[in-house]
Image: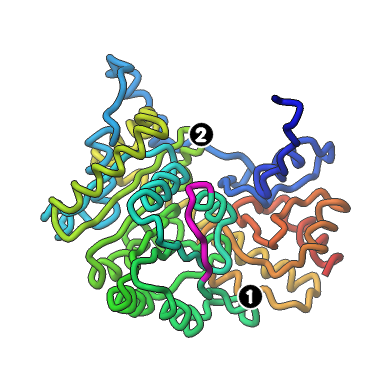
Amino acid sequence: MFEKVQIAPPDPILGLTETFKADPNPDKINLSVGVYKDATGKTPVLETVKEAERRILKQEDSKGYLPMTGEPVYCAQLQGLLFGEEHEIIASKRAATAQCPGGTGALRVVGDYLNFVHPDASIWLSDPTWANHNTIFEAAGLKCEKYAYRDPKTNGLDFDAMYESIKKIPQGDVILLHGCCHNPTGIDPTPEQWSKVGDLLAKQGVLPLVDFAYQGLANGIEEDREGLLELTKKVKQMFICSSFSKNFGLYRERTGALTVVGDDKKQADTVMSQVKLRIRYNYSNPPSHGGQIVAVVLSDKDLKAQWIEEVADIRERINEMRHLFVKTLKEKGVQQDFSSIIEQRGMFSFSGLTKDQVNRLRDEYSIYIVGSGRINVAGMTRDNMDRLCEAIKSVL
């Protein structure tokens, strides 16, 4: 049977990383995959993560299976991070959380749930969105549609166009919203705009699915949930997909979660019962180690405070690179305006580079950027900035 199999096309992001690894150029630069790099170009292990692992190693006495929804302490701490420990949603217990293998795993579980319970529903994705969103939901059997988001003229949010396109979403469909640090543009709505979107979704009868993969990397742990909290004031029912890959650096530990918010506890538990079946059919129960790390850190007041400082260091380095990138391009005489990158947040920005320019950067300079022009700002360092900007100048 294998004789009939054809080679699958490479993933547009991870496949590029494989090409990067094979590139012999010692000065190569990878700005494609969404992994944080420190000032030395390495992906560090946070000190709080190391301390949590020491405690886990000392105390762990079993490798038995977790429940289908994962470690209860982890799920409880995650809800506190999302909403604030005193939030009405937590007090009324109308949220239920399942630990999942990364944010990607959470998205796939949602896709399978929607396809089973609401087979006629389409899911609406921002234009543009993370490349894997389409493939995840299409693989789950969902129809993907687009709503307006980025204004190519200003490289900012075209909120009027976004609002008008959301008006056209039929009742009973689902909309995916990026909680903060929009991937790939780095452009986020203001709290006031989030509020208007919430009003519209409630009126339209559209279910929000919030992909919340970068909490803490925009303005702060508490500040970055402002959009989500505005949404909860307007909409009673939603899904939230979380990831600790970026803000804990737990990329290979696949540590994420799916949270359902319902009208009340009974409704949330009912929906979660269907989610649990999708989990059982997919991977049965989640991996433990990453969830244990997060639970230990968030349950300890001092460790949590230290972790918040570490996230702030990550955020500040990324923002420093944004400013240095724009400044260096200007100093080199580049006429094209890249100043919008300073206003964007998170690891990614839409550079405006064309596919041909991206290909030239790869072929001539061993600089790897996704074909859409999305750049991982966290891959920039003071050491590679001059070479990067000189190369970009040459291909513009």
Q: Residue at x 30, y 46 (%)?
A: 305
In the image, 364 versus 219, the foreground residue is 364
Q: Which residues are magenta?
A: 139-146
Residue 252's label in the rendered image is 2
Q: Is residue 87 above or below residue 294?
A: below
Q: Earlier in the sequence, mark 2 or mark 1?
A: 2
Farthest-out residue, left: 92
| Image quadrant in which you'd find residue 72 | top left
Q: Position of residue 211 (x, y in %)?
A: 42, 56
What residue sits right under mark 1 in the picture? 339
Q: CA distance from mark 2 to mark 1?
A: 34 Å
Amino acid type assigned to the residue bearing label 2 in the image: Arg
Q: Position of residue 389 (x, y in %)?
A: 77, 62
Q: Residue at x 25, y 72 (%)?
A: 234
Image quarter of the C terminus: bottom right
Instruction: Classify mark 1: helix, strand or loop.
Output: loop
Residue 297 within the magenta-colored segment of the rendering: no
- 225 displayed left or right of 328: left
In the image, 41 versus 368, the foreground residue is 368
Amino acid type assigned to the residue bearing label 1 in the image: Ser
In the image, 188 versus 233, the foreground residue is 233
Q: Is residue 329 above or below residue 302?
A: below
- 18 displayed left or right of 146: right
